[in-house]
Structure formats: C-alpha cells, structure tokens
C-alpha cells in the first residue's frame, strides 16, 4: 500500500510539474505583432475607384488554355483605358509592354543605389463556365455596381489589384510623394495559364538589367475572418511561399477483348488499384515551414486554451496535426496533396478496353520536389504494368523558396497592414495555389503574397466561380494598404 501511495504521489508531482511547464511556456509566449505608428491616410475618391474597377471588369481579357482562342483586342483596350484613367501615374512612370500584353512600369527613385520594390498584379481572367451564366446576379462582364459591391469576373481575381495599385500611385503623386527606392509595377496578362509569356518575361528582363529587389509583393492570401481557431477577429495572412505543381499520367495498356471472357484483372482494374494506392498512401503531413510560422505568430493572440496548445507544440503537435489533416482546406497546408482528376477507359459496355489512363495532380509542399513525388508515386503503385510519367514536363513547378519573416521588408509589410487593419493579426501562411511570383526568384529573395483586402469565406468561394464581387469599402482599404506599403518601404 505504501508503494501505491508513493506511486500516486509521484504521478501527482509529475503532473504538477508538467502543468507548471505548460503554463510557464504559455505565459512567456511573446507577441510578434508590429505596433504601428500613427499615419495620415492617403486621400482618394472611393466611389471613383469603384467605377474604375467596374470599367476594368468590362474588358474581356480572357485567358484560355487553347491559345487559338486568344483575343488580343480587349487587352489592348485595357491598356489604353489605364493610361487614360491614371494620367499622373503614366506621366511619372515609364511603361514597357512585355510579352505582347504585360505591362512593366518603372517609377524612378531618388536613390539609384537603393534596392527597388516590385508590386505584382494580373489583369487576365478565367472564362465563365458555360451553362452557369444564369447563376450570376449581374452579368459577369457588365461591371455592375450594386448593393455596395463591384460585380463581375476579375473584381477579386485580380483586376482589383491593378486598379488598387494604380489608385494608390495616383493618390501619392497628387500629394507630392516621390519614392527614394525605385518602384516597379508588373501587371501580367496570362497568370491564369501560368504566366510564361507575361510574368516570366518581365522577370527575365529585370534580371538581365541586374535588378535585385528589396522585396516583391503579389496576390496570394488575404485578410480573412473565421479561419483561425482561437481568434475571433480578422487575420492578415501573408504567404511566404507557394506549393509546387505536378500532374502524373498513369497508363495501362494490354489486350482488350470481349467482356464475356475477362482476365482476372482488367486494365481498368489494374489502373483503379494504382489510383487507390496513391490515395491511400499519401505523402506524410508535416507541421513546419510557413504553417509552423503561422502558428508562432498567431498563437500569442489566441484565446487561452489555444494559446496553451500553440506554446507547447512539443507536446500537442500530434493532436494539432490530426485535427488539421481532418479537413481538406487545412490538410492541404500540411502535405503534398494527391488528387485524381481524370480517369479514361472503355467505349462499350461489353468490350474490355485495351487502354486505360488516369491523371493524378499533386500540389507539392515546400521541402519536397517533383522528383521526390514521382519517386513516391512509382514506389507506392509498385506495378510494372502501370506506366507513370509527368503529363507535361514543361508544366512542372517545384515549390518556391520560403521567404523570411525577420526582415525589414516583412516588418514594413506587417506595419502597413496593421495601420489599415488595426484589429487584424498579421501571420505568415502558405499559398496553396500558383501565382506569377514564382517567376521572380532571380530578382528577389523576399517574396510575399497577400491580396490586402478583407474577405469572408463566401467571398473566397466566388473566385473562379459565379457572382464574383468586391465590396467598395474593401477596395478602398486595399488602396490604402498599397499606398502605405509604398510609403513605408520606398520613402
């Protein structure tokens, strides 16, 4: 009995020590938020800016996978529209047309030795899916302003970025601002199909000129609410990197024949087994890199229970990973995802197909590469009857390098965001989709990604879908952020 009480006493002591360690680490978790100084907001007409965005939406600057469908006229008209609506910006900056339709602006700084800053946006948009036109409250390309929103394709993705940046530049010029650092604006025309003729060529041109930027900012994340457990208010998520992209083709070829005398396993069965193995044996989840940094920055601002967890990841990491991988949206931030997107085989119900084909798309987590994913796929399938190869070797993107958060550029960006959104928590993140920024690593090490406007989850679901729209007040806040970014980094 004495031994039992001694054991119980020891357990109580150990639990007390553990509780003390957990509480102490939680109490010592420092805030990483920037305390912004007072500032004077830039002056502009928000309704006029909204009208400009509505006009921009009306140009059908569509990107199609089939280049034969490309219509250059709306792109030319859009460029002329920008020059007319933003005369001060076009007088102060040199504009070059690159790759046929992309626009590279240079706003010379007073100190040629200072590293420049680069702000990116794109003005091409995706088509409206045929058959969904009737789902729109207002036609996708009429640029309607109603109920406090600008409606139409590109209102969010990403003509609003072009308009907001130029509105900010126009307003700064009106108040007499002149940058110390040179400011480059790079507006791509083919981001929705990879940016190879636009962003890639502008990046190559800057690299040829020896440009080494202080930092670069592109779209990516946003200022959102309801996405971070333990934080009721908005969170401004700054993408430090973006995932890579690889599509693998799985092919099985063999004898066909009549369905009345099938082999033990048909070509479809062989391929289905291979796909099932890939879906069952996915690459492991990893709580590191930008996602780990996100929790480190957001954790100190969370409610106590979540703050306790974030401060003691050495103990709670398995639980956190289990919770995050249970949902598709958060699972994608922790691992290279595996998605079977095409499965083709068979032409007639009583004929065994001699050919079966599947496409599996992978979005690659930083720390892995297209080569390691291909090796993983071949090892998991482990069937010589299945041929596995990239669909298009030219359409492979490895994950980008991860930007640092301990830089003057990141701190200035965080300060700019908190000046406009004082109720927001600024935290790093991983950008799950692709952006034009991936082409610019030859000219900038510090590359960040955020669309600096406030969105709800409903807004985000409208991107590439029906009823895309942007609140006028959110456009105005975006203009203010871009103006502050230029003030805080280029002056």
Image (cartoon, grey):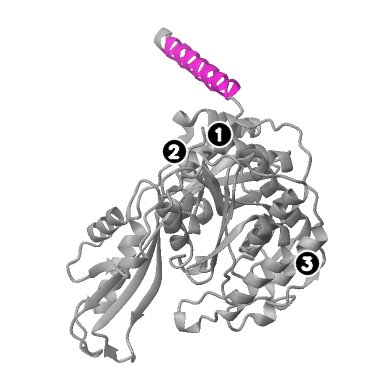
Q: Which mark is residue 408?
A: 1
Contact? badges 2 and 1 (CB < 8 Å): no
Question: Residue 77: horizontal and vertical position, in percent?
Answer: 64, 76
**Residue span colored magenta:** 4-29
The x and y percentages for residue 65 are 46, 76
- What is the secondary structure assignment of the residue under circle 1? helix
Kindly identify which residue carries mark 2. Answer: 318
Along the line of sight, the residue nearer the viewer: 383 or 16: 383
Left or right, 177 with respect to 147, comes to left
Sooner in the amino-acid sequence: mark 2 or mark 3? 3
The quadrant in which the N terminus is found is: top left
Judged from the image, the secondary structure of the residue bearing numbered disc 2 is helix
Residue under label 3: 51
- Does residue 5 belong to the magenta stretch? yes
Q: Residues within 10 Å of mark 1 (few under 14, many from 20)?
A: few
> Marks 2 and 1: which is nearer the front?
1
């Amino acid at each position: 009995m004495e031994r039992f009480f001694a054991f119980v006493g020891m357990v109580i002591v150990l639990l007390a020590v553990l509780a003390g360690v957990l509480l102490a680490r939680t109490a010592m978790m420092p805030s990483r938020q920037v305390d912004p100084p007072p500032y004077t907001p830039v002056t502009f007409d928000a309704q006029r800016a909204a009208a400009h965005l509505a006009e921009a939406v009306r140009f059908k600057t569509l990107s199609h996978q089939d280049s034969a469908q490309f219509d250059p006229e709306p792109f030319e008209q859009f460029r002329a529209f920008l020059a007319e609506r933003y005369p001060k910006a076009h007088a102060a900056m040199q504009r070059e047309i690159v790759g046929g339709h992309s626009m590279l602006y240079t706003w010379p700084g007073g100190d040629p030795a200072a590293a420049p800053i680069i702000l990116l946006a794109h003005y091409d948009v995706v088509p409206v899916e045929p058959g969904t036109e009737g789902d729109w409250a207002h036609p996708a390309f009429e640029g309607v302003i109603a109920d406090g929103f600008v409606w139409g394709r590109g209102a969010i993705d990403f003509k609003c970025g072009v308009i907001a940046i130029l509105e900010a530049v126009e307003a700064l010029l009106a108040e007499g601002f002149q940058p110390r650092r040179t400011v480059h604006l790079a507006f791509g025309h083919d981001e929705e199909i990879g940016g190879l003729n636009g962003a890639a060529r502008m990046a190559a041109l800057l690299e040829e000129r020896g440009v080494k930027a202080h930092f670069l900012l592109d779209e990516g994340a946003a200022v959102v609410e309801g996405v971070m457990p333990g934080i009721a208010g908005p969170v401004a998520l700054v993408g430090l990197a973006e995932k890579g992209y690889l599509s693998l083709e799985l092919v099985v070829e063999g004898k066909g024949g009549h369905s009345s005398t099938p082999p033990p396993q048909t070509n479809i069965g062989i391929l289905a087994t291979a796909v099932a193995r890939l879906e069952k044996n996915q690459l492991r989840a990893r709580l590191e890199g930008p996602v780990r940094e996100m929790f480190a920055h957001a954790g100190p601002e969370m409610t106590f229970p979540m703050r306790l967890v974030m401060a003691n990841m050495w103990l709670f990491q398995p639980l956190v990973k289990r919770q995050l991988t249970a949902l598709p949206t958060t699972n994608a931030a922790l691992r290279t995802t595996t998605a079977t997107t095409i499965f083709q085989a068979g032409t007639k119900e009583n004929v065994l197909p001699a050919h079966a084909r599947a496409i599996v798309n992978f979005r690659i987590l930083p720390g892995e590469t297209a080569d390691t994913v291909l090796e993983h796929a071949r090892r998991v399938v482990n069937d010589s009857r299945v041929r596995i190869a990239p669909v298009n070797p030219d359409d492979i993107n490895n994950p980008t390098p991860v930007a640092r958060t301990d830089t003057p550029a990141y701190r200035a960006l965080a300060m700019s965001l908190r000046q406009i959104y004082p109720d927001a928590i600024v935290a790093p993140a991983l950008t799950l989709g692709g952006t034009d920024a991936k082409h610019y690593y030859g000219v900038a090490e510090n590359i960040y990604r955020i669309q600096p406007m406030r969105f709800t989850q409903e807004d985000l679901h409208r991107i590439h879908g029906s009823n895309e729209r942007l609140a006028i007040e959110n456009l105005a806040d975006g203009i203010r952020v871009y103006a502050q970014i230029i003030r805080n980094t280029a002056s």
